[in-house]
Amino acid sequence: MLEETTISRIIIKEYMEELLNALDVDVAVVGAGPSGLVASYYLSKEGIKTVIFERKLSIGGGMWGGGMMFNKIVVQEEGKEILDEMGIKTKEAEKGYHVADSVEAVGKLISKTVSVGTKIFNLITVEDVMLKNRGVEGLVLNWTAVEMSNLHIDPLTVKTKKVIDATGHDCEVVRVLERKVGPKLSTETGKIMGEKPMWAEIGEKILIENTKEVYPNLYVTGMAANAVFGSPRMGPIFGGMLLSGKKAAEMIKKVIQ
Ligand code: 48F
């Protein structure tokens, strides 16, 4: 016999346990787009305790829709290696240009990331950082529903050794930090430089360079990295996103204790 309250109890208890476990983590990734998922995958694979906070109900960010809702993504040779590792099918459509189904790509990316141990919390928005002597030392969270309904409800805070801003074009974590501490980022001006217009080749190349620590304990990956460091967008070519996520994970792996 099925008891409704038993189902409710299991859900509440299991979720609360995971949320309590997320109060103190090694790495907190903000945003579950391609770069955030890949970064989390490579961190978790090394046994580094990693969680993702994602504002939306769906995981995958801007990858589902391919280019202009044609649900295909294109990757270059280097990016293809990561798709291969995730078991995502690709076809060389033209020399050096590999195409994949964006729905398969997101599905498998999520599956792989979760299976190596990343806990993904959806429907949670990161609204601020906890800033102490060593730099960013935590994240300030609230339910997305609270943000959407504009209710005046205080957030909760989690502690983390490192934060990755993988929030895409809006670079939201860096933005809130800049707003509160002023021009102290490791960019040329100390401020967010702002994303530049489309130039796929340069955008993809420079993205890997831009993937770095922008303030003590705060790293940027994916489109957020190009937005922070003032570099071009690149559209639906995804190799850079994947490689940027991997680079963020490798950098953190080297320094985390
Ligand atoms: O935008 P998104 O997919 O970021 P990405 O990994 O990839 C960019 C590409 O999709 C595409 C592109 C490729 O050429 O330019 O745009 O850099 O995913 C960002 C995720 O972060 C979530 C957002 O809902 C999305 O799923 N997000 C943004 N701000 C917050 C957040 C926040 N404050 N708290 C939690 N999640």
Image (cartoon, rainbow, N blue to C red):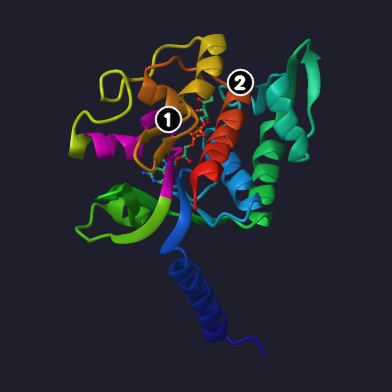
- Against 30, is 171 above or below? above
Tell me which residue sits at (78%, 40%) in the image: 87
Left or right of 33 on screen, residue 87: right
* Label ID, residue 224: 1
> x%, y% of residue 244?
55, 30
Tell me which residue sits at (71%, 33%) in the image: 82
Disc 2, ligand 1: is the CB inside 8 Å?
Answer: yes
> x%, y% of residue 143?
35, 57
> x%, y% of residue 252?
51, 42
Residue 114 visible to the viewer: yes
Q: Which residues are magenta?
A: 162-178
In the image, residue 235 lies in the stretch drawn in magenta: no
Tell me which residue sits at (43%, 27%) in the image: 225
Out of 257 and 146, give the one closest to the viewer: 257
Specify the quadrant that holds the N terminus. bottom right
Badge 1: residue crowd in 10 Å (few <14, some 14–19, many ≥20) = many
Residue 234 visible to the viewer: no
Left or right of 25 on screen, residue 204: right
Instruction: Say what secondary structure mark 2 lies in.
Output: loop
Disc 1, ligand 1: is the CB inside 8 Å?
Answer: yes
Q: Earlier in the sequence, mark 2 or mark 1?
A: 1
Left or right of 197 on screen, residue 97: right
Residue type of the residue flagged with mark 2: Ile
User: Residue reaching furthest bottom?
Assistant: 1
Q: Are marks 2 and 1 in contact (CB under 8 Å)?
A: no
* Label ID, residue 237: 2
Residue type of the residue flagged with mark 1: Ala
- Against 208, is 177 above or below? below
Tell me which residue sits at (47%, 51%) in the image: 27
Out of 81 and 122, give the one closest to the viewer: 81
How far apart are the two marked residues, 2 and 1, measured between alpha carbons?
15 Å
Q: How many marks?
A: 2
